[in-house]
Image (cartoon, helix red, strand yellow):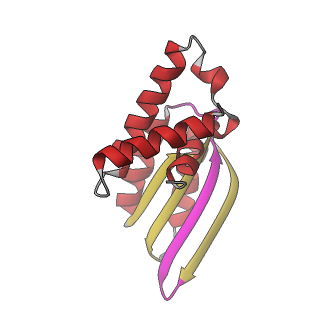
Amino acid sequence: MANEDLIYRITRAVYERLGPSADEQMVEQLVTDIYREVNQSNSVSTNASISGSSGRMIISVFGMDHPGIVAGVSQILAEAGCSIIDINQTVVQGKFAMVIIADTSRARESTAELKERLRSEGEDLGVRIYAQREDLFNAMHRV
């Protein structure tokens, strides 16, 4: 079974049990924990079995437009040793929206640490920043 399909099936099962009001961060953590446990119980190294997309992160940024948002987010990624693979940003009637796909395979910190740094930077910048591993993002958005 493909890794993405397994993640999708786990995610769908968690959402079915928790219902439509399920907290996305809680679901992501549960799916990650279950996926790791399944891989370990199959005697397969988690790093070897996860597709390359687990080394990428989808970062979404939303808020009122002002100078420094792109620079602030980019600085966090640079400090962590991550590369920006793709970036798209727009401003609509003063509202800022940006999506970044970042290569985190060489990050000098864990995904959880990076997500917390991005969330904190978002607070400092007055925007909301959501970050999620690409494989989990893809699987969760198939639900």
Q: Which residues are magenta?
A: 92-109
Q: Quadrant of the N terminus?
A: top right
> Foreground: 99 or 94?
99
Residue 74 occupies quadrant: bottom right
Residue visible at 45% across and 55% down? 130
Is residue 87 shown above or below 107? below
Residue 66 image offset from top left, x and y in percent:
47, 76
Residue 13 percent location from the top left of the image? 41, 42
Q: Residue furthest bottom?
A: 93
Residue 82 picture quarter: top right
Compared across the picture, whether 44 is left or right of 95 comes to right
Examine the rendering and report whether any part of residue 73 can be seen.
yes
- Compared across the picture, whether 40 is left or right of 45 comes to left
The answer, for residue 104, to whether it is visible in the render is no
User: Which of 125/129 is in front?
Assistant: 129
Q: Nearer the viewer, residue 111 or 10?
A: 10
Q: Which residue lies at the image location 49% right of the left edge and 36% below the top edge? A: 111
Q: Is residue 102 magenta?
A: yes
Q: Image point 31% across, 44% down: which residue?
A: 17
The mark total stands at 0
Nearest to the observer: residue 27 or residue 81:
27
Q: Is residue 66 magenta?
A: no
Above or below — where is 41 with respect to 2?
above
